[in-house]
Image: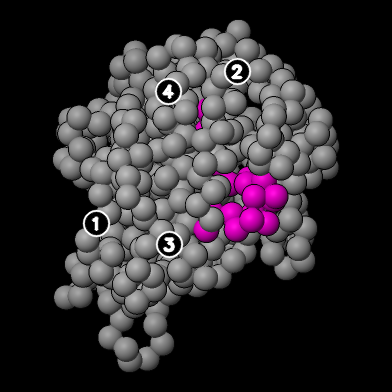
Amino acid sequence: DSPDYRDAGLAFGAEFLFGSATAAYQIEGAAGEDGRGASIWDTFSRTPGKVLNGDTGDVADDHYHRWEADLDLMAELGLEAYRFSIAWPRIQPTGRGPVNEAGLAFYERLVDGLIARGIRPIATLYHWDLPQALEDEGGWANRATAYAFADYARLVGQRLGDRIEIWTTLNEPWCSAYLGYGSGVHAPGVTDRAKALAAVHHLNLAHGLGLAALREVVTNDPGFSITLNLHVSRPEGPSGPEAVRRIDGLANRVFLEPILDGRYPADVLEDTAAVTDWSFVEDGDLEIISGVPISVLGVNYYSSGRVRVWDGEGPKASADGHKDGAGTPWPGAAEEVEFLEQPGPYTAMGWNIDPSGLEELLVGLHERYPELPLMVTENGAAFDDVVEDGAVHDAARTDYLRRHFTAAHRAMGRGVPLTGYQVWSLLDNFEWAYGYSKRFGIVRVEYETLERLPKDSAGWYAELIRTRRIPEAPVAS
Ligand code: PNW
């Protein structure tokens, strides 16, 4: 038992799905092409001061034009699955109405190209690029957006519903709600705690309505899922457990319980009573949200936090290894939670590296939901890569991945039904508020030329996939 999570040689079964993940706005570019409408991220990134260096997704990795070469690259790495997202404004430019054929055709080509190469498509319907026209009507703070999402899901399902392996409704609704409508560091940049909580509910509702629509139209018995960025918080001092309860409630249970248990957690409603009366939850909503069971839960994990309740004296600490504590106006009682300095080491995002958090998260979920299969839908790291003689020797990234795969393997050894692992990300890409300054790819993208260069971590991952055993790896200095 090595405490540093660097066990080489651990084996994964034949069914375990190794892959990599991306998202439409982060890689596609071609923002004005083939009838694509504007999304909230177009508007936000073009607003001065919102994204570092004024970066936008206008060109990104130009994947919209280079998709075929990118698929060949995935095949060369031996990926068994590819998790991508579909841009709603390519399918419905204003968020409503008939299909924009040219936009949908892109995803048909992509999915057929994956299948032709033996790579299984995992499709996310919403990875944050809401059509701007829907934001103009209130966005996720508006109940009607959930119904518009269901119509969109049906349109996509009618066309791709014979070929997708796993459908994911939403990616990280925590980010959409709290970063989009609470702190405003993500699009649409709204800062209103009550709207953030309304967004939480409408995103949950969209999930339920979306799955119901999909179930009616798909023909190939796919998996149904949602991807959550669940927060692992470690308690500090006597108030630590109370702080953990508050963050776990607002970040995790406010999504898990409506979807998996058909109820909102009573303590969360209490914690937020001064912010909202939750009257946006209508009769029958919880039946809709939990109505179509998910067959696998997607888990995104990068880092953990260390928390206690602020005693009201001195400045409130907000150093957060997971970056969400800093400046995030957690609504209600969680606002009084302090995010403490972490021991490190850190990634280039300033996120504390803590593979044991992944093991604990997976084991905890399995204890709470014993029948539910899990999949890691994102894990990876940004580091300050350098190109040397035409190579990127990203030992730190390889080491990060090796330790997290070890953690996942240990969780499986403790009985967790983990079905796969999608590394974030295949390509360096538009890292939201950080623009192109943070590189998460196992493949480097040279933004001047748009050339792709697999990093050493990609070679390591290809070997893991080929041998189904965790290879030796250089230890990060
Ligand atoms: C996730 N936070 O984003 C997303 O799903 C990806 O699109 C993204 O590139 C990746 O993780 C790396 O950041 C997050 O502030 C963004 O806590 C922000 C936070 C968490 C996840």
User: Looking at numbered disc 1 in the image, what kind of residue is underneath it?
Assistant: Pro
Position of 149 relative to 248 (above/below): above
- Give the distance between the C-alpha atoms of the residues marked 4 and 3, in whole angstroms: 27 Å
Quadrant containing the N terminus in the rendered view:
top left
User: Looking at numbered disc 4 in the image, what kind of residue is underneath it?
Assistant: Arg
Q: Position of residue 162 (x, y in %)?
A: 52, 12
Q: Which residues are magenta?
A: 123-141
Which residue in the structure is indicated by mark 2?
159
**Labels 4 and 3: the sequence-earlier one:** 3
User: Looking at numbered disc 2 in the image, what kind of residue is underneath it?
Assistant: Arg
Which residue in the structure is indicated by mark 4?
215
Characterize the local packing of mark 2: few (<14), some (14-19) or many (20 or more) Cα atoms within 10 angstroms: some
User: Is 240 placed left or right of 343 in the picture?
Assistant: left
- Give the distance between the C-alpha atoms of the residues marked 3 and 1, in whole angstroms: 13 Å
Q: Is residue 248 in the magenta section? A: no
| Image colouring | one colour
Q: Which mark is residue 306?
A: none
